[in-house]
Image (cartoon, helix red, strand yellow):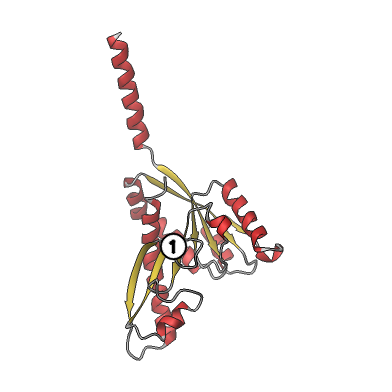
Amino acid sequence: MRNHTNTTNSDEKIHKDSSADLARNINIALLFSGNGSNLENIVRYFRQDSIKSELESLKIQANFTLAICNKKEAFGITRCQNLGLECRVLSHKDFATRLEFDNALLDILHKREIDLVILAGFMRILGEEIVSKIHAINIHPSFLPLHKGANAIKDSYFSSEDFGGVSVHWVSKELDSGEIILQERLPKIKGESMEDFEKRIHALEYTIYPKAIISALKTIK
């Protein structure tokens, strides 16, 4: 009886240890509307051996399952093809209402068992219904809560602050108001044109977004 009990406990321990060693498979979808430069930067970043090793040490298997684009003519679709990343086109123009589009998007995400949605230049506001049912993150070109909305770079450039910035946050029902995952200030340069300021903002986006994604992946159960 004692031997049987000991064997069972041992088996249970082995099973638990084996389970603990298994990596968490996290399926990721990237949503975009245009050029897709942020998308390509993210995918290439996570294909680096050093990043794969980092995720392996965290017991995370990040699977970039597919990309979804809402504009049929977007250049980002070509980027996906070059990356060997599946891309679905789901045009918002094919739906009578925002809710119908959101429901169609949600259906795709659920069927593909997506755990994390990354908005990478996705130029549509997701409705409350879909936001409440997914884990999604977004990047915003300002040091939130400063300068929310579509004109963030321009508003930041002409503001009295001596810095701009980039923020990555969880998507919530309030625009650009979700919990901050990672953000960084960008010092302004006296006499700099708005065009050059915008270029530096985008360069910072390429640096900060992949790091924020790793932080987000750590929280996905």
Count of all numbered marks drawn on residues in the image: 1
Say if 5 sits above or below 73 in the image: above
Q: Position of residue 130 (x, y in %)?
A: 57, 56
> Is 48 displayed left or right of 78 in the figure?
left
Kindly identify the amino acid type of the residue bearing the numbered disc 1: Gly
Counting from the top left corner in percent of width and height, residue 79 is at 54, 64
Q: Residue at x 32, y 12 (%)?
A: 4
Label 1 residue SS = loop
Q: Is residue 20 above or below residue 171?
A: above
Quadrant of image for the N terminus: top left
| Left or right side of 48 for 111 | right
Where is residue 187? Give x, y as percent.
Answer: 31, 80
Q: Which residue extends farthest bottom?
A: 191
Q: Is residue 67 visible?
A: no
Q: Which residue is mark 1?
A: 178
* Residue 59 horizontal/vertical position (percent): 35, 44
